[in-house]
Image (tube, rainbow, N blue to C red):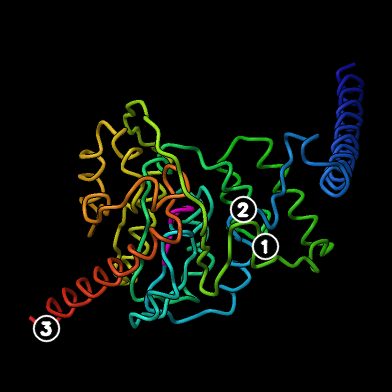
Amino acid sequence: MNHLLYTFNSKNMRRFLSSLILFTLYSSIIYLFSIFICGSIIPSSLIPNLKYPIGSVGHLYSRLKEVKSTDNIDVLFLGSSHAIRGFNTRDIEKGGYKCFNLGCKAGTPLQTLTLLKRYLYQLNPKTVVFEVFPATFEIDGIESSLHLLANDAVDQYAIEMALKYSNPKVYNTLTYGMISDFFKINSSFIEDSIKGNDTYFRGGYVERKGCYWTPRAFGKHKIKLNQNQIVAFEEIIKMLKSKNIKVILVFAPVSPSYYSRYSNVGQFDSIMESYTEYYNFNKIINLNDSIHFYDEHHMNKEGVDLFSPKIIEMLNKEKARTHNILHK
């Protein structure tokens, strides 16, 4: 009797496992096919849980295409859209520094860490200037994850980044990115260097000119750091210092009206200063709300033209400091 019962249970278990495997296989095929159809044919506005912003605002596609043929630089710029639109690599190269801007729209430390794992060895910079905008330490980084997944290859680093989010939009975009890479769906994609008021320049800089912001009042805001972003940030600092790369943190200028909203910016400054050299340029350079910005926290061309000499001055100062330390 026990033998018959064991045989019965064993057969049922095999049937169950077989059915489960078939169901999983069938479901996976349906899921992959659905993702392919949704990503390739259906407008993104109709599928909120799948966004594939290839060639989107910020010229990330062009930047990541160019970086693959760039190596052995003096200065690597990292950060968010403030890095993209604030560090004019053309001006800084005139100051004697070979550089590249590897910023990412809405980029948080999580996305910056992914980019560094992928490109740091190849770029081999002597100095890294990391733009640290408080908001990028407060948000989850899902938006910038989608931009990164859509505009660069899906590799082990992209998968590691995506798995840090329990978010269907990120997983769906990751899956479509894998399909796109496998079938080379976007192999013929070309991004225009001029899009609207934005112009992409070699070296990763995006210029916005002819646009000005009308100032307005802001309510007070207390900066609250996301622990996941701090963990990624600390890993970045540790990675760079372990390779004897000079690290400089920069809070790029935002409009004075916007900057005044922070109720605890002094605390943020203290935290940044505890890691390495840190420059809050909102306290160093005087810019005008309606002349030097195209929105509340992004400089236009006029603002960047004043910012670039200050960055060169900072690089020269840090270079001299390092030289003095080494020759003491």
Residue type (three-letter) at the residue carrying disc 3: His
Residue located 32% across and 71% down the image: 245
| Vertical position of residue 80 compared to residue 46: above or below | below
Q: Mark 2 points at which residue?
A: 57
Quarter of the image where the C terminus is located? bottom left
Contact, CB < 8 Å: mark 1 with mark 3? no
| Residue 101 located left or right of residue 59 | left
At which x and y percent is residue 319?
22, 76
| N-terminal label among 2 and 3 | 2
Confirm whether the magenta stretch covers residue 233: no
Residue type (three-letter) at the residue carrying disc 2: Val
How would you rate the neighbour count of disc 2 (Cα within 10 Å): few for under 14, some for 14-19, many for 20 or more? some
Q: Name the residue under label 1.
A: 153
Which residues lie in the magenta part?
77-82
Residue type (three-letter) at the residue carrying disc 1: Ala
Cα separation, mark 2 vs mark 1, equals 18 Å
